[in-house]
Image (tube, rainbow, N blue to C red):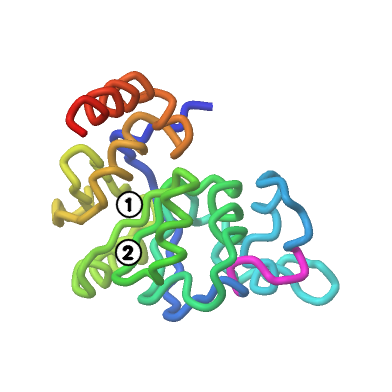
Amino acid sequence: MDKKFTVLRSRAVPLPIENVDTDQIIPARFLKSTSREGFGENLFRDWRYDKDNKPIKDFVLNDTTYSGQILVAGKNFGCGSSREHAAWAIADYGFKAVVSSFFADIHKNNELNNFVLPVVVSDKFLSSLFESIEKNPGTEIEIDLSNQTITDTSTGKSEKFDINPYKKECLLEGLDDIEYLLKNREAIEKFEENSKLWN
């Protein structure tokens, strides 16, 4: 699987709910596994299924009207406990980016560590995205990581977003922290050798 993130153009799944916490993203009873696989089927489990494990028709992930690799969520996404499993579930379901006007810091970092790009936009831009998707579920959003821009292709509206430079490089190259260190091993060893000469 290619983990590199350059430009993503996709339809989006709208979740206009604020303060979505990690227990709602992946309920605690599903945290037994230590493998990252299989969590996607329980993403938003208690919103997707009733007590008899039947799909709740009006929940957005069960609505075939919406699809895509981008989740557009309400403000303060990923609050609550620091469980990384929430990011595993989002990635395993197939989302490559989550757009919101505010993320809980730990969850934001967990997404980045799992090759999911959290895109922070203004409240105004977020509202306009929800409007566009509501008017036309086929609306596509384009996220350009190199230029750090997000564009609503139906309106042409665009915004810049911030990202940690190191995490940006990791995503562009599809490298986790260990892979990044291994790739730069030669440069690190050379730096250490030079440091010995200076001391």
* Amino acid type, mark 1: Thr
Task: Residue 168: give its label.
Answer: none
- Up the image or down, 154 lies above or below 125; here it is above
On the image, numbered disc 1 is attached to which residue? 139
Is residue 69 at all visible to an observer of this figure?
Answer: no
Quadrant assignment, res 60: bottom right
Q: In the rendered view of the protein, which quadrant contains the C terminus?
A: top left
- Up the image or down, 192 lies above or below 31; here it is above
- Up the image or down, 174 lies above or below 126; here it is above
**Front label number (2 vs 1):** 1
Q: Which span of residues is magenta-colored? A: 24-30
Main secondary structure of the magenta stretch: helix
Residue 90 image point, x, y percent: 55, 54
* Amino acid type, mark 2: Lys
Quadrant assignment, res 169: top left
Quadrant assignment, res 129: bottom left
Q: In the rendered view of the protein, which quadrant contains the N terminus?
A: top right
Residue 192 image point, x, y percent: 30, 28
On the image, numbered disc 2 is attached to which residue? 135
User: Given the current orientation, which residue lies at the most extreme front position?
Assistant: 199
Secondary structure found at label 1: loop
